[in-house]
Amino acid sequence: MAKPVVAIVGRPNVGKSTIFNRVVGERIAIVEDVPGVTRDRIYSKAEWLNKEFNLIDTGGIEIGDEPLLTQMREQAQIAIDEADVIVFMVNGREGVTGADEEVANLLFRTKKPVIIGVNKIDNPDMMDKIYEFYSLGIGEPIAISGSHGLGLGDLLDEVVNQFPEEEEDEYEEDTIRVSVIGRPNVGKSSLVNAVLGEERVIVSNIAGTTRDAVDTPFEKDDQKYVLIDTAGMRKRGKVYESTEKYSVLRALRAIERSDVVLIVIDGEQGIIEQDKKIAGYAHEAGRAVIMVVNKWDAVEKDDKTMALFTENIREQFLFLSYAPILFLSAKTKQRLQHLLPLVNNVADNHNQRIPTHVLNDVIMDAVAMNPTPTDHGKRLRINYVTQVTVAPPTFVLFVNDPELLHFSYKRFLENRLREAFHFEGTPLRIIARKKNE
């Protein structure tokens, strides 16, 4: 199920980035008391009252013809279009401005919940400053202070209350959901059409909950699949055609609804930074991943080309060392026949559950081969291991002191698990807990 999306919008210098950082708990957005410092949307996961959502920090919206302001207004419009709930930020110290009224007019055209947060109300004596914001007609203003963290609970309570109801899963349990993600023009649509055109077993086209995505269920060799194609891009002005950052939000929604993620790379153009950003979301979400290098027919090759490209992928995507790589051509269908068997394999690995006694045997053998680390004379002792969930496979180590499980030793244990149980294509999660927890 895709997480709700919350967009923070408003003119420059009202404290959007400060609120964003408070909510997500990290200093992700640049905070500087200069209008326009946030250039593009910034995305992060957040949680309130045990409900997770994606939060977007937008650049300020200001009416004017300057290129930067125009770009930021377009960026914010995209965020507004994609959001389930909108937080409209205003500056309580300055009162209602003409720019606030322009933003309010923009928000009136959305048919989505809008919550107005009056920022910079730093003490109770300033509460009377919120009343003039009723004139914007957005609803009841909520007083907050980004710098002191006041009123954020009230704001987030209202945000969560406005989330859409969760929809029931419309597909059978054994259906493999496969999302096709990547930056624009890498051949995502061509790949989807090639898979469906070859199998010719389309059941129906169902509009997905992911905006700009279409769910296409089909069946092959008694296995049911749903392809989630994120390639469709609305033609709403140049910003939709030019900005690659728009693909990130579409990818986020598709990833959250997937079992297996196909990260499509342009074999002709090679790897760019945006590819790594999109791939990072799939890894963080704990989804099974396959790297698909498309347009391989158009690449001038010799006997070393594929090996060199593979080496480059491994260097650029260190965090996806577990992901298999498939070189193909959606246009000519070269190697396309290998795709669905690979999807089946990584989906099985993603849901693989290891018997506890076998798991403990492997871990104890690993410890015998490479003894646990020590810190200040205290040695890590692993008492017991159990697998607590699948998708992705997650293991809990009960130890004497979780602080003693260093990153390098955790990586060693992960590698041993992969060698023993063939977890190709899926991330693994290893959690250390104290013995009595």
Image: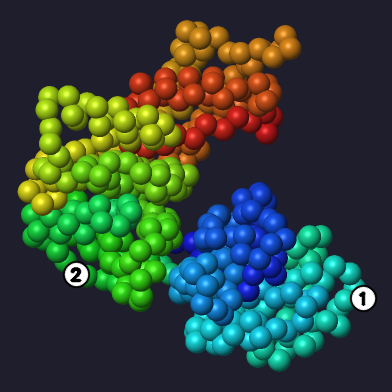
Element type at mark 1:
helix
Residue drawn at (19%, 69%), measured in percent from left and top?
204
- Image colouring: rainbow
Residue 101 at x, y = what percent?
A: 63, 86
Mark 1 is on which residue type? Asp
Q: Is label 2 in contact with label 1 (beta carbons under 8 Å)?
A: no
Quadrant in the rendering for residue 380: top right
- Identify whether 95 is placed above or below 203: below
Residue 41 visible to an observer of this rendering: yes
Disc 2, SS: loop
Would you place residue 106 above or below residue 208 in this image?
below
The mark that comes first in sequence, 2 or 1, is: 1
Query: Residue 198's image quarter?
Result: bottom left
Identify residue for label 2: 204
Q: Say few, some or many: other residues with alpha carbon within 10 Å of mark 1 (under 14 / 14 to 19 / 20 or more).
A: few
Q: Amino acid at mark 2?
A: Ser
242 vs 308, left or right, is: right
The residue sitting at 61% across, 23% down in the picture is 405
- Res 199 quadrant in image: bottom left
- Which residue is label 1 attached to? 125
The quadrant of the picture occupied by the N terminus is: bottom left
Quick check: 77 above or below 347?
below
* Residue found at x 57% / y 33%: 431
Query: Label 2 to label 1, Cα distance in Å?
Result: 60 Å
